[in-house]
Image (cartoon, helix red, strand yellow):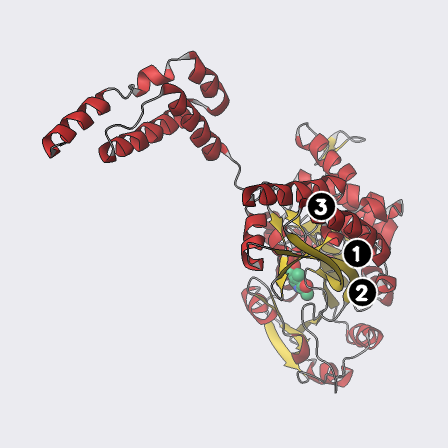
Amino acid sequence: MKTPEAKTGRVAAALRRIPAIESLLNREELKALTDRFGQQRVTDAARRATEALRQRIQQDPDTEISVSSLDREIVMLADAAAAFSLRPVINATGVVLHTNLGRAPLGESVAKRVADIASRYSNLEYDLEEAERGKRDVHTAKLFAELLGAESALVVNNNAAAVFLALNALAEGGEVIVSRGELIEIGGSFRIPDICAKSGATLREVGTTNKTRVADYAAALSERTRLLLRVHPSNFRIVGFVERPRLSELVNLAARSHVPLMEDLGSGCLENLSAFGLSEDAEVGESLKAGVDVVTFSGDKLMGGPQAGIILGKRELLQKIRKNPLFRALRVDKLTIAAIEATVALYLAEDYGAIPAQRMIRAPKDAIARRAEALEASIRALGGFSVSLQDGESVAGGGSTPGQTIPTKLIAVGDAQRSADELATALRRNDPPIITRVEDDRVLLDLRTVLGEEEEREIVKAFTRLAVARA
Ligand SMILES: *Cc1c(COP(=O)(O)O)cnc(C)c1O
């Protein structure tokens, strides 16, 4: 019989046989690891691996002590510690501009352009003709003028920053007239009344939630008025007994009263997308043509570019915005400018297929269905999954109007041994993670937002792993 004293003795003896950290690390096997991960990380991993072994020995003094299995554990721990936190994921949700998944993926040529500019010096603020200091705005202003007829352009960190900066520069200390039907909240606690208050402007609400007429704006005008603001309702929609002034009516009122009109377009479509089911998204070019003085929108929503807030409009007003000290605090870096320039260049070349968000929104249901059929067959062939195709709807997302959907074909998957939630969790834990929807105890995959064959192969591999794990 083993007495407690005997166990204590054997534990002590076993613990003494654990190699010292120093001697573990000084071996060739781990030296290479140090080159890869750095001394500190490998030392930490070695400490944690030996500590875990020590605890196993406390439980069971007969635990095998093997240097090679310690090595394996150290490699695993160092690997895990070195893994990036921000990782690519496969978006199978069918939400094209998914804010939690990074909104618009950049086009390949755009990403390449960003990489080129990132690792080298550039003429970011250098006028190559005059050999003197230049402005970073020039690179994008020319293109927005060509594409949308914008007199002038500025780029800041995001559209929230654009609205905040413009309100501060144009209306601080005065009043901004906004319809009660447009006092919206966008996700992430961006509320028009709050942003207005922070900018130092006073909100002058007019009309009612469902009806505002141009006469309501006119009646609110006073010597304190600095700006008329129109906000795209983005992520919500009022239907029924509704009235909103036409843009031309507001433009006329603004011109007559010598108060600028600003429009926060939110998603800001650069091309008409009504043929693809998105008829309610306001077009930037249309607003400028109608005579809106300042237009703001996001770079990474329907435009399909990088995160940015784009301000287009009348030169004089944009100069005032640019001179505001906040502009310096909210400006973008060279990577964003490179990405915007390259994205707008694709619009000018009418190469919408090279802009992933545009390509996905424009993809016909038939094309999605063909890809879905092939993937369905591959998953079915693995066995153990019930797979079928069903009609469904993709959405643009990123604050585009609800109710505007794009018809799609979904792959519905059930698993013999897992609930739909368990299956979705397993897919999310895949490397790369696969994000899906769950409905009626089925996992739904929408290939509209799956980027291409490579990601489709990853999805099949993930299901293969799950099938093997079940066997
Ligand atoms: C999305 C949105 C914003 C915020 O834009 P970000 O680029 O996310 O900062 C502001 N206003 C409207 C109307 C929007 O739809």
- Res. 165 in view: no
Q: Is residue 285 left or right of residue 126?
A: right
Residue identifier under label 2 = 278
Dot 2 falls on a residue whose secondary structure is: loop
User: What residue type is disc 3 on?
Assistant: Ala
Label number found at residue 372: none
Dot 3 falls on a residue whose secondary structure is: helix
* Residue with the most extreme front position: 1
Residue identifier under label 3 = 381
Q: Is residue 102 left or right of residue 407?
A: left
Q: Disc 3 or 1, which lies upstream in sequence?
A: 1
Q: Position of residue 386 (x, y in %)?
A: 67, 56
Dot 1 falls on a residue whose secondary structure is: helix
Up/down of 137 relative to 228, above or below: above
If the image is split into quadrants, where does the N terminus sit? top left
Up/down of 185 relative to 333, above or below: below
Q: Are marks 2 and 1 in contact (CB under 8 Å)?
A: yes
- Res. 148 in view: yes
Q: Nearer the viewer, mark 2 or mark 3?
A: 3
Choose top left, top right, bottom left or bottom right for residue 424: bottom right
Q: Quadrant of ligand 1?
A: bottom right
Q: Position of residue 258 (x, y in %)?
A: 77, 72
Q: Disc 2 or 1, which lies upstream in sequence?
A: 2
Q: Disc 2 or 3, which lies upstream in sequence?
A: 2
